[in-house]
Image (cartoon, rainbow, N blue to C red):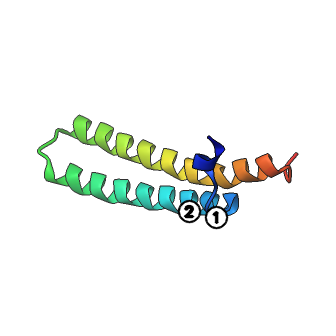
Amino acid sequence: MSQFFKCITSQSFDAKVGQMGSWIAANAVLCMGMYKLTKLPLSETEFFFGVLLVLTVSLLMVLMGLILPLTYRKANGSID
């Protein structure tokens, strides 16, 4: 069964790709979300909560990108 789970990339490369992917996704969500919010006929309250939601999702993706390299370093024992 272990033959199906061979690693083809290093863990540090995976962490960097995950980090860049989450940052790119955060920027994409932010740009597309703001663009879509400006095109919808929303009241001020709906627009405010829409912006808040888009910013929250983008911030969560950025935080996920910041945590990925830390989990790699913790797994290798370089952080106490």
Residue located beneath label 1 in the image = 13
Q: What residue is drawn where x is 65% and y is 44%?
A: 2
Mark 2 secondary-structure assignment: helix
Provide residue 11's location: percent of width, then percent of height.
Answer: 68, 57
Provide residue 65's location: percent of width, then percent of height.
Answer: 57, 53
Provide residue 44's location: percent of width, then percent of height.
Answer: 22, 40
The image quarter in which residue 53 lies: top left
Image quarter hosting the N terminus: top right
Say which amino acid is labelled 1.
Answer: Phe
Query: Left or right: where does residue 10 sit relative to residue 57?
Result: right
Residue located beneath label 2 in the image = 17
Q: What residue is drawn where x is 68% and y is 55%?
A: 69
CB within 8 Å, label 1 to label 2: yes
Residue 56 or residue 80, whichever sits in front: 80
Farthest residue toward the right? 80
- Count every numbered label the image shows and give the total: 2
Mark 1 secondary-structure assignment: helix
Say which amino acid is labelled 2.
Answer: Val
Structural crowding at the residue carrying mark 2, measured as other residues with C-alpha within 10 Å and reported as few (<14), some (14–19) or many (≥20): some
Query: Left or right: where does residue 13 sit relative to residue 48?
Result: right
